[in-house]
Image (cartoon, rainbow, N blue to C red):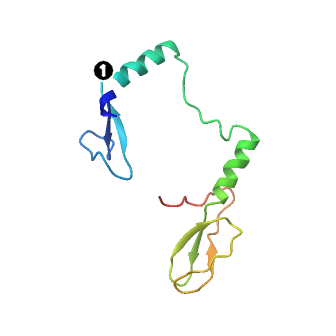
């Protein structure tokens, strides 16, 4: 990465750690990467990234299915959390109590599983 002008940083700022679970990068000015991007955008000025998932009815359905597969369950006895599809029957391995799905408002999505 460094060879082409991409410098890893855990903070998003110069001087951040170069390793870790959440690392982004900075683009060095006048680096091979920056120059190649500039040339590409000169040739194709309208080139922009757009995630097409969700643009149509099928994409919206897929996004809802993905969100539904990450339903948060909580053990009412000890508070341990797990994430699964909304139709599973989960039991806590620590205290043997049944775990219940988090109640969501209409249109609200369950929080994503931690990484």
Q: Is residue 111 above or below residue 102?
A: above
Residue lying at 26% horizontally and 39% vertically, measured from the top left: 14
Residue closest to the eye, 37 or 73: 37
Residue lying at 36% horizontally and 46% vertically, measured from the top left: 23
Residue lying at 54% horizontally and 86% vertically, measured from the top left: 95
Residue 62: percent from the left, percent from the top?
70, 48
Residue 60: percent from the left, percent from the top?
71, 45
Q: Is residue 59 above or below residue 2?
A: below
Where disc 1 sits, the SS reads loop
Q: Residue furthest left?
A: 15
- Count all numbered tags in the image, as a single digit: 1
Residue lying at 69% horizontally and 71% vertically, measured from the top left: 88
> Which residue is tagged 1?
30
Q: Is residue 19 above or below residue 109?
A: above
Residue 26: percent from the left, percent from the top?
33, 35
Residue 104: percent from the left, percent from the top?
64, 64
Residue closest to the eye, 94 or 1: 1
Residue closest to the eye, 56 or 24: 24
**Image side of residue 9 versus residue 62, left or right:** left
């Amino acid at each position: 990465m460094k060879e082409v002008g991409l410098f890893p940083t855990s903070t998003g700022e110069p001087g951040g750690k170069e390793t870790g679970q959440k690392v982004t990068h900075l683009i060095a000015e006048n680096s091979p990467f920056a120059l190649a991007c500039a040339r590409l955008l000169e040739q194709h000025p309208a080139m922009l990234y757009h995630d097409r998932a969700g643009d149509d009815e099928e994409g919206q359905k897929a996004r809802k299915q993905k969100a539904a597969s990450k339903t948060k369950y909580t053990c009412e006895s000890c508070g341990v959390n797990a994430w699964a599809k909304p139709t599973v029957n989960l039991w806590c391995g620590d205290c043997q109590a049944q775990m219940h799905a988090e109640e969501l408002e209409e249109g609200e999505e369950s929080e994503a599983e931690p990484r």
